[in-house]
Image (tube, rainbow, N blue to C red):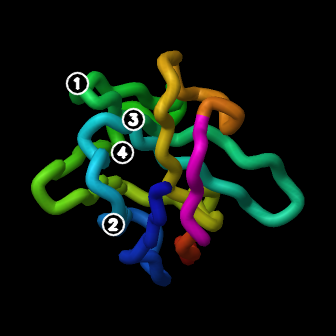
Amino acid sequence: QVQLVESGGGVVQAGGSLRLSCSASGRTFSSYAMGWFRQAPGKERDFVAAISWSRTTYYANSLKGRFTISRDNAKKTVYLQMNSLKPEDTAVYYCAASAQRGNYVSPREYDYWGQGTQVTVSS
């Protein structure tokens, strides 16, 4: 069982930066792939980024270059650094953990989810 808690969301002006954190419980954090998704009101939950147990990273094409995912296994934490934020980045951001092998783009590939943290980018 893995419990995930996101933090670091908030309100930021367009062009600003935020770093989201996701802290995990459980002894086998290092064996999970970790992902970030986001969901805007009235829209589907979209893939943002993922990092495998071997630290291979995956990004949504539209976000590559602005967002960076990383992990610290000793702290059982995964991070999402978001730069040059735009109003369209406004959403609830969710952290997820996957014990499966795949490309980690689909929410169905994930076994555990956090409660989400709100990110609001003002224009």
Q: Earlier in the sequence, mark 4 or mark 3?
A: 3
Query: In the rendering, which numbered label is found on residue 23?
Result: 2
Q: Secondary structure at mark 4?
A: strand
Residue 42 x/y as whole percent = 88, 60
Cα gap from disc 4 to disc 3, whole angstroms: 17 Å
Mark 4 vs mark 3, foreground winner is 3
Q: Secondary structure at mark 3?
A: strand
The image quarter in which residue 107 lies = top right
The type of residue carrying mark 2 is Ser
- The reply to whether discs 4 and 3 touch (Cβ–Cβ < 8 Å) is no
Cα gap from disc 1 to disc 2, whole angstroms: 18 Å
Q: Earlier in the sequence, mark 3 or mark 1?
A: 3
Q: Magenta region: which residues?
A: 110-115
Residue 36 x/y as whole percent = 49, 48
Pick out the residue farthest to the right.
42
Query: In the rendering, which numbered label is found on residue 33?
Result: 3
Inspect the magenta stretch and tell me whether residue 112 lies in it: yes
The type of residue carrying mark 1 is Ser
Pick out the residue farthest to the left.
74
Residue hosting label 4: 67
Q: Is residue 83 visible?
A: no
Q: Earlier in the sequence, mark 1 or mark 2?
A: 2
Inspect the magenta stretch and tell me whether residue 105 lies in it: no
The type of residue carrying mark 3 is Ala
Residue hosting label 1: 54
